[in-house]
Amino acid sequence: MINKILNKLPRKPSKSADNREIGASNTFHGNSAPLRGSDIAGNPYVSTSLPGVYPTSVSGANQGNKLPHAVNSKLNGSFSASSYEALPSFKDVPSTEKHSLFIRKLGLCCVVFDFTDPTKNVKEKEIKRQTLLELVDYITSANGKFPETALQDIVRMVSANLFRTLTSPPRENKVLEAFDVEEEEPSMDPAWPHLQIVYELLLRFVASPETDTKLAKRYVDHSFVLRLLDLFDSEDPREREYLKTVLHRIYGKFMVHRPFIRKAINNIFFRFIFETEKHNGIAELLEILGSIINGFALPLKEEHKLFLVRALIPLHKPKCIPMYHQQLSYCITQFVEKDCKLADTVIRGLLKYWPITNSSKEVMFLGELEEVLEATQPPEFQRCMVPLFRRVRNCLSSSHFQVAERALFLWNNDHIDNLIKQNRKVILPIIFPALEKNARSHWNPAVQSLTLNVRKLFSDTDPELFQECLLQFQEDEAQEKDVNQQREATWKRLEEMAAMKAASNEPVLITRKLSHTSSS
């Protein structure tokens, strides 16, 4: 199931009545999947181990049980290699002692090693890795409900390993525009050989049918969720993939946390949009939201509409939008497909944040606009078609051939073409000057060819309207030519007067009539 979640880019999910508050899990669209049991066991990590041991602290309810001797020694600063020894395997102890051994192994794995030096504590790191693998298998094969003490210790161990201060190279000098950031090499966490297994353990713990939600919510609480969300800013894309899957599972299993999770993600977006414009996990958070939005019940709640207006639409503002635009577009389109009346709101929001000087960003906006228009019905289209096609006219007139070409591709969509034909008496007069100028003088042959095709569509659909627009364009062109000739004559007269009085150093006086002509 996890592989299905993270297998492909978003597709239009089936509108099943079964998926209401949490969307179908296969609406995720990542490229890599977490390890399965056999994958972990058969994937020996290169021991990029490192010096020393990091003491960790766990807050709130996660501080309940005492840690075993080895961990206490570590926390007291007296850690030594002899105090970290492997515990017996689960298959080597009677069934009655397995739970006690499970708790002891969890305590042993609360020790956090420093992975900045691959030569330190190699043996101890391998012991911990093997112990973590055993814990994953134990949780996977559990055939009885986990007692509360086990839930508490599992969350404590996970917290000790995962919740840390993220370190990343300085981002002040990164170029956040266009696609430069995507081309940079991602920063990989050297502790991943341990972190990956801890994430796998957490994932299987949350997904396990033996995890009692009523008990587990005391430890997988709001504080735990917030610290999990903080990790989405990790530089390591492997960690963000796991986080995406884990958070989605938590959202699906712990219904009581759903409003809180949505609000917390909302706050991350606000901070990103209006303060920092720096965050590594916006795309992954949007992937989760794409699945959540797909499961929203109809009619949409007012809070969901506010989230669209206040958070999702403003996400078009940051310069680094290429990093997450595909996921954002999917979420926006989901809203319009859920409630077609939101199309006007979305289109006007796109126009509000429309890029003026960034051509690559403009091409992305045109692609998103096509997806939204495909789900737009005639009444909503008519509300926003005038400002919309004024913007399309500017795109058609763009000297950047990709912008003009992408705008002309709108007519290749049958639904959009029908909407335009139904409202051609309003739309054609707006865009006709751009079409005519492109057909006559655009430097790019592909744009010229596409423009001629669009002109022919209008000419064949409504020859009378097309002829009216052509005559009006010719009149406006002639009038513009007269204005330009008057302006040139005015400047020429000013130059002659200035030349005549240059020798006497007299000021050049302009008559009221001449001034009016010049300003016009």
Image (tube, rainbow, N blue to C red):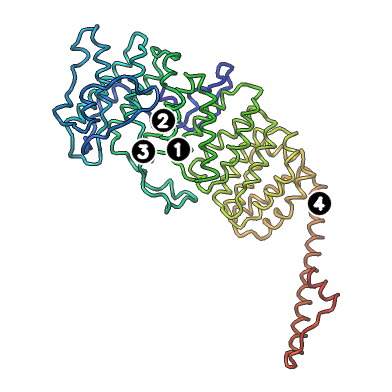
Tell me the quarter of the picture where residue 120 sits. Answer: top left
What quarter of the picture does the C terminus occupy? bottom right
Kindly identify the residue that appears in the image at 80 percent across and 44 percent down.
425
Q: Where is residue 438 shown, x and y percent of the image?
A: 67, 56
Q: Amino acid at mark 3?
A: Thr
Q: Where is residue 353 shown, x and y percent of the image?
A: 62, 46
Query: Which element carries disc 4, helix, strand or loop?
Result: helix
Q: Amino acid at mark 2?
A: Leu
Q: Earlier in the sequence, mark 1 or mark 4?
A: 1
Return the residue found at the far bottom: 503
Q: Is residue 167 left or right of residue 366?
A: left
- Label disc, if present, on residue 281 of the rendered structure: 1
Q: Which of pointers 1 and 4 indicates the residue nearer the eye?
A: 1
Residue that mark 4 sits on? 467
Q: CA distance from mark 2 to mark 3?
A: 16 Å
Mark 1 and mark 2 residues within 8 Å of each other at the beta carbon: yes
Tell me the quarter of the picture where residue 332 sits. Answer: top right
- Label disc, if present, on residue 243 of the rendered structure: 2
